Each structure stands twice: as structure tokens, then as C-alpha cells.
Image (cartoon, helix red, strand yellow):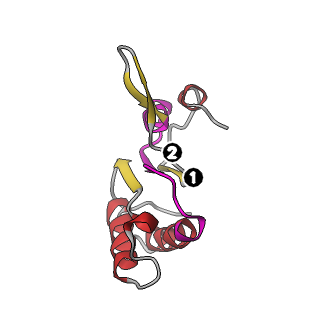
């Protein structure tokens, strides 16, 4: 288990995007005088340009489908926010996983734009 404190001490400068696709990765712990300190903030401090994470528990099957399509769009040159939005809308319109439980938990913050794959 990676804590926010441990994540904040990583050297992630040059990392275009950190993806945390497990349950509730975007939530933080409220601390006196510090507000919400979660993994997202820790990844920003560590140098990750953008972050994708979930706000509540997610389904393994839904997450697998969402992330597979998300990475496919990224590899095709679609901007980060557009790729996530397109995949979420695609799932919303599909029969099997159209309930928000499967797709709406995921958020992207930080830098946008396409990612150059090597």
C-alpha cells in the first residue's frame, strides 16, 4: 500500500500521467490546517503532470473495460480529458455498463493534451 506521504516523496518529474485505478484512490484524509491531503495532491507534489483516479469503489470488470478503452484512445493521440470523457460516454450509452457505478467514479486532473508514446 502506497501512502500519500510516500507518494509525495517519489521523483515523478517527467511522468506524463499517473493512473490509480483501484477503489477510492482520489479521496483524501482531512487534517487540521491542511485540508484534504490525498494521493492526487501527493502525485502533484512528486511531479506527475496529470492524475486519473477514482472517487469511490469501482467494479473490476467496469474498470478493466474503461481503462482498456482509455489507453486505446490515448495511444491514438486523443487528449487525456477527451479520451476519458469519450470512454465514459461510450459506457453510458452501452447496455451492460451504462449505470454510473461503472464509469463515473473516474476523474482526471492536471495537465491535458495528448501523450506521445514511444
98 with respect to 11 (left or right): left
Q: Quadrant of the N terminus?
A: top right
Q: Is residue 21 above or below residue 63?
A: above
Q: Residues within 10 Å of mark 2 (few under 14, many from 20)?
A: some
Q: Quadrant of the C terminus?
A: bottom right
Furthest toward the top, the residue is 33
- Is disc 2 placed on a helix, strand or loop? loop
Q: Residues within 10 Å of mark 1 (few under 14, many from 20)?
A: some
**Label drawn at residue 116:** none
Q: Is residue 75 magenta?
A: no
Alpha carbon separation for disc pair 1 and 2:
6 Å
Residue 114 locus on image (x, y percent)? 38, 62
Question: Residue at the location (35% across, 47% down)?
Answer: 109
Q: Is residue 78 above or below residue 25?
A: below
Q: Is residue 21 visible?
A: yes
Residue 44 locus on image (x, y percent)? 43, 35
**Label drawn at residue 22:** 1
Total marks placed: 2
- Is disc 1 placed on a helix, strand or loop? loop
Asked whether disc 1 touches disc 2, contact meaning CB atoms under 8 Å apart, the reply is yes
Residue 73 locus on image (x, y percent)? 44, 73
Q: Which residues are magenta?
A: 39-62
Q: Quadrant of residue 81?
A: bottom left
Question: Residue at the location (63% across, 36% down)?
Answer: 2
Question: Residue at the location (50% across, 42% down)?
Answer: 14
State the residue position of label 2. 25
Amino acid at each position: 500500500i502506497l501512502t500519500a506521504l510516500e507518494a509525495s516523496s517519489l521523483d515523478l518529474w517527467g511522468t506524463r500521467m499517473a493512473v490509480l485505478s483501484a477503489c477510492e484512490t482520489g479521496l483524501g484524509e482531512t487534517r487540521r490546517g491542511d485540508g484534504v491531503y490525498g494521493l492526487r495532491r501527493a502525485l502533484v507534489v512528486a511531479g506527475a503532470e496529470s492524475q486519473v483516479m477514482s472517487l469511490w469503489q469501482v467494479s473490476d470488470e467496469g474498470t478493466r473495460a474503461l481503462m482498456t478503452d482509455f489507453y486505446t484512445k490515448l495511444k491514438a493521440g486523443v487528449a487525456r480529458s477527451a479520451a476519458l470523457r469519450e470512454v465514459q460516454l461510450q459506457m453510458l450509452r452501452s447496455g451492460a455498463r451504462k449505470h454510473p457505478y461503472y464509469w463515473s467514479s473516474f476523474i482526471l486532473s492536471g495537465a491535458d493534451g495528448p501523450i506521445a508514446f514511444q
